[in-house]
Each structure stands twice: as C-alpha cells, then as structure tokens.
Amino acid sequence: MAEVLVLVDHANGEVRKTTAELLTIARRFGEPSAVFIGDGLDAARETLAKYGAEKVYAFSGDDITGHLVAPQAEVLAAIVQQVSPAAVLIPSNAEGKEIAARLAIKTESGVITDAVDVEAGPDGEVVTTQSVFAGSYTVKARVTKGTPIVAVKPNSAAPEEAPGAAADASVEVTISDAAKAAKIVESKEKQASGRPELTEAAIVVSGGRGTGGDFSKVEEFADSLGAAVGASRAAVDAGWYPHSSQVGQTGKQVSPQLYVACGISGAIQHRAGMQTSKTIVAINKDEEAPIFELVDFGVVGDLFAVLPQATEAVKAAKG
Amino acid sequence: MNIVVCVKYVPDAQSERGFASDNTTDRVNVDGLLSELDEYAVEEALKIVEAGEGEVTVVTVGPDQAADAVKKALQMGADKGVHVSDEAISGSDAPATSLLLAEAIKKLGDVDLVLTGMASTDGTMSVVPAMLAERLGLPQVTFASELTVDGGSVTIRRDGDAASQTITASLPALVSVTDQINEPRYPSFKGIMAAKKKPVETWGLADLGVDASQVGLAAAWTTVDAITKRPPREQGTIITDEGDGGTKLAEFLASRKFI
C-alpha cells in the first residue's frame, strides 16, 4: 500500500489535534507516514502511533528549524522523491501553506490549500472540498499533476484511533545553502492564554467595536463555555486584542460548532472568516447590523448586560 | 534600490463574485480592483524608496482589466508598471502565475527586493510568494508585520500563532507583508495626474520566453470538478433584550446542546 505523508504539527513534541485529523484522513489513501521536524520526537511518537502512523521520518537540527520554511520543503521533497507517496497532507496554516507551495514547485505537483474535507474518489483519487469567496461557494477539486499536495484546515475530520507501528524510517537529506538564506534570529514564544486554539476550537466567542475595548465580559462568557476568544478587525486595528486572534479575511478563518459574535456588525471582511460556522449567535445594539442576516439566534441589546447574565446562566446550568 | 511589487487584480469582495463557465474565477463580468492586501506592499515599497532612493516597478499578470491594478499602484506613487497579458494565460493556476511573475522579474533584471501582499483577496491561497521565492532562488521572508532594509540585508517581524519571530536575509530577497505593516495612502490628485504619464509596458508570453503549453487552464496542475453555491442561511430567531436577553441566549444554547 502506498505511503501518505503527513507533516506533523507540534510544539516541542506536543502534537496538535490537527495532526490526528490528518493521520485519520491519510488512511483513506494508504498507510500514513508521519514527517516529524524538530525536537521532542519521544513525546510525540505515542500520539502518532495511536492515530495510525506506520512510519515516522524524523529530522531535527538548526539547519532545518533555524530557517523559514524552505528547509522543511526540501525535507518533504526528498521523501516524496524516494517513496512516491499517494499524497502529502500538510496543516493549512501560514507556514504549512508556504511549505506546500515550495514542495509543489520542487516536485512539479499540484497543490490545493484550505481543504475542509479530503475524500477518496471512485478510483481512489484525492478529492478535496474547499469553501471559497467568504464561504459562499463549495468547490470540489483534484490534483492532476505529480503527487497531490493538500493543505488541510483544522476540524476537517474527526480523529479516529487506529494503532500504527510508528517505526523509524529515514531518508538522506542535505539542506541546500539557498534554503538556509532566511534565518530566524529570534523567536519569542507567545504567552499561552489557557484557552483553546482559535482555529481548532469547537466554540468561538468574538468581540468587536461594540466592546469599546473592554473584552472582559467576552472572555468571561468564553471561559464559561470553554471557548476560544476571537476579535474583529476593528477591534484588532484599535489595539484592543492581538492580531493573532483576528477572525476574518485577513485573519483566521474559523468554522466552529458555535460562533458567538459580540458587538460585531458583520462586514464582509469578518464574515469571510466565520460564515461557515455551524451555529451562529450574535449580540448587537444595532438591529440593522448585517451580522443578524447570518444568525441562528440573535439578541438586539447591550453586550455588557446580555453577556454577564448569559455567563451566570451557563455556569448555573453546568453546576 | 530597485523594488518590484507584484500585484493582483481581483473581483471586488463587496460585489457578487462568481465563476465563469470553465470553473475559473470570473474576472471579466465583475467589478475588479487592486487586491486590498497588495496596497500594503505598494505602500511599503514607496516608504523604503522615499526614505532612501530607488525605483518601484509594479508587475501584474491578468486580463486587460488588470491594467487598473497597475494604474492604482502608479497613482499611489510607483514609478512604472509591467502588465503581463496574453490570451493563453487565462485560467492559469498559482504555479503558472508564479512562473510568469518569475520570468517578468528576471527580464526586469537588477532587482534588490520583491514585495508582495500576504494573500490575494479572491483565491486567498497565500502560495504565490513562496512559489516565486522558490523559482527565483531568493530568500523567502514572508508575512512581515515590520520590515527594515539596512544596507544589504532585510529584517522582518513575523507574528505567528505560537511565537513572534525575527527573520533576516541578505538582498536580493522576496518579502510578503501583512495588513499590520502600514496604512496604505490614498492616491492624491497630483498622484492621479502624474500616473497618466508613467510608463506601463505590456508583455506577452513571447516577451518572457514562456511557451503557451506552460500556462492557462489546460496546463493547470489541479482541476475543479464541481462548484455549488452555498444556500443562504435560514433566518434565525432574533429577540430584543428586555432584561432577560442573556437568559434566553443561554436557553437557546442549552436547546442546541452547547451547555
């Protein structure tokens, strides 16, 4: 059976949920092989095995991790050349999409990004689903040249356990000088919020202009639900919340089970980032706000009155 | 300092965007404009040149209407434009677009810095800058929310989810910028008048030494099988808070099993 390469998304060996999703998807096309780049393989191996990785290609060292994306694309290209996998699955985040892009050119292979589903077609081919134009169209596409390279968004599959051997495998790779041209000279870890990651969260509560810069009620409501906190571009541009929390066209595109928009009018820029959420709730003072066109449930009112009451009710219900 | 800014002509996100009969993005029957995210790259190029010296050349690949994107950049202050246009290009995918941009940049020659936006506002793949760096063999320094050019090197801040990184490379280099980097200027009346006299060259495939078999829809490395319009969301329940809005909201969440 052909190998399917999965680029592991992790922080020092702590494997992120998206990797379990990608390994689950990989099994639809062949035997998953995890490609692990960086430190912490010992910590990661158990999770990789649990979700079906038969092989693990591991690489570390400053030649790779001390530089921006290019060396990682060289690593993947070397494995693709050696094992001719059925597909390469990569997390569809900023870094992953760039690695996919470079790998596509190196291997003369088609690349599809932002896939929300990846299925096997009638002949076992890799068929992707994407949500485009701010979620207004659904597109099914295929790679027609080379090895299918697909960047897959979080929550595209429910992770299913299926024990794999996670046996060490190796491929000889020499990183070129050209790939080492962009050096990472400093890396400041961001402080963890203790909340779920925005693009992976089942529930997202976002604040906008209507918060007036006070996100405390938004955060308290989010915490009562175990949700991630997002922000509109207006709130980010005003400096009220970090850019990494921005939901919208130029920020994160999220598709949670539940999205709660607080004091967000719902401009196209924002809708592009949340329109495909399963259930949408909004609280806004302005009953004419376009966000109400999208909602399953909307409250016309002051978020500073509505949210604390809702937070208490959620806490009471949860006991 | 010779700076090339790659820009894209995209359908206006405020208008009704759709597809042509061959499943490619409709770029002809929709109002189009310079991709908003490319304005940040144009602005950054202008700032660098204004602080020192040099020339800003804008390059686009696209149909006749794409000349509007070049014009807007020239009105903002760029010095000259190149419009890569050829009937055979229609339907090109990202690898083909990056090939055309790479060949155009090689033809311009003597380029110190290639600037791009972080993504287009239509395809939103964010892959062309990385592909272009790969094709040109230039250091890829992408998603800059801060950019400093100092002598022969470039340094950026890249704000990722887990960390904020400082990345440096020597020139020539390719840099993509985010919408956090600056506040793009509006063209002034003087800028609009001056743009009319600025040179814009139109290059076809023959000028770039690219064969028609390498570009266009038939040469794409991916294919779209089906497109379906997402049904509009059904109008939900909207209530006005009369002192119990929060309670009713919680009741709704409980009814959908979120609590």
Image (spheres, coloured by chain):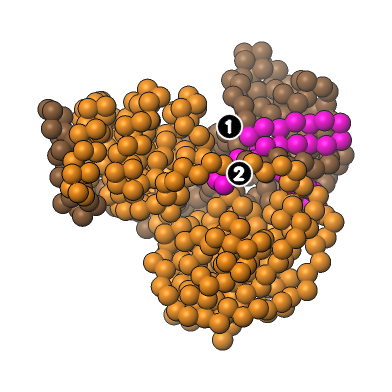
Chain colours: A orange, B brown
Q: Residue at x 80, y 43 (%)?
A: B169
Q: Residue at x 19, y 49 (%)?
A: A319
Dot 2: element? strand
Q: Is residue B242 magenta?
A: no
Residue A216 in the image: above or below residue A294: above
Dot 1: element? loop
Determine the image quadrant of residue B191: top right
Q: Which residue is mark 1?
A: B180
Rendering coords of residue A164 (x, y %): 52, 81
Q: Which residue is mark 2?
A: A189
Which residues are drawn in magenta?
Answer: B136-163
Residue A161 in the image: above or below residue B49: below
Q: Amino acid at mark 1?
A: Gln
Q: Residue furthest bottom?
A: A1
Residue A59 in the image: above or below residue B118: below
Q: Amino acid at mark 2?
A: Glu
Subunit ID for the residue under disc 1: B
Subunit ID for the residue under disc 2: A
Left or right: residue B40 versus residue B134 is left
Q: Is residue B143 magenta?
A: yes
